[in-house]
Amino acid sequence: MISFVRIDHRLLHGQIVYSWLKTIDFQAVLICNDAVAEDQTRQRLMQLSVPDNKKFLARGITATAAILNNPKNQPVKFFIILENLQDTAALVAQVPGIDSLNLGSIKKSEGAVKMSNSVFLTPEDKALLLDFHRQQIKLDVRQLANDEPIDIYPRLSR
């Protein structure tokens, strides 16, 4: 079962540990990132941030989809973190039932427009978000759990 899906280019860091992990009911943190899935050092560093009573997994996109689609894993509440919208779109395409996303932080890149203090979107990013909107996936922009959520969909046409 998916408890929460967050997109944050920093993946697992202090804001997630001290804000989100304390407010979301979950049993396992699942980092969905092909590069991290292959990097044992990064995995060990991230795992240090996860509370001892929670599981930590780092898997690539295809392996994450397999975990989430496996009926044996339905009872497990996953807090999923992805690095970017492209990976998110790939996961959404493979996992039915992702109905909500949190945009925490998308770094500034060439051609990106500032949408909030922490989210910069390229035209390609906007197109992906509009596709999520067509799929009726809820989206909010918040860095911290207690921040006021921003509905970004109305801003995408600008």
Image (tube, helix red, strand yellow):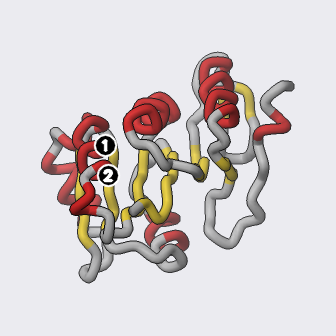
- Indicate the secondary structure of the residue bearing disc 1: helix
Q: Looking at the rendering, which quadrant does residue 73 occupy?
A: bottom left
Q: Amino acid at mark 2?
A: Leu
- Indicate the secondary structure of the residue bearing disc 2: helix
Q: Is residue 90 left or right of residue 98?
A: left
**Tag 2–tag 1 contact (CB < 8 Å):** yes
**Which residue lies at the image location 62% right of the left edge and 69% below the top edge?**
145
Residue 28 is situated, as x and y percent measured from the top left of the image, at: 31, 67
Q: Amino acid at mark 1?
A: Ala
User: What's the CA distance linking mark 2 and mark 1?
Assistant: 5 Å
Question: Crowdedness of circle 2 by 10 Å Cα count: few (<14), some, many (20+)?
Answer: many
**Which residue lies at the image location 49% right of the left edge and 61% below the top edge?**
4
**Which residue lies at the image location 51% right of the left edge and 52% below the top edge?**
6
Question: Crowdedness of circle 1 by 10 Å Cα count: few (<14), some, many (20+)?
Answer: some
Q: Which mark is drawn over residue 68? A: 2
- Locate the N terminus and report the quarter of the image it occupies: bottom left
Q: Nearer the viewer, residue 27 or 21?
A: 27
Q: Nearer the viewer, residue 120 or 128?
A: 128
Where 135 sits versus 18, above or below? above
Q: Which mark is drawn over residue 65? A: 1
Residue 57 is situated, as x and y percent measured from the top left of the image, at: 23, 57
Residue 56 is situated, as x and y percent measured from the top left of the image, at: 25, 64
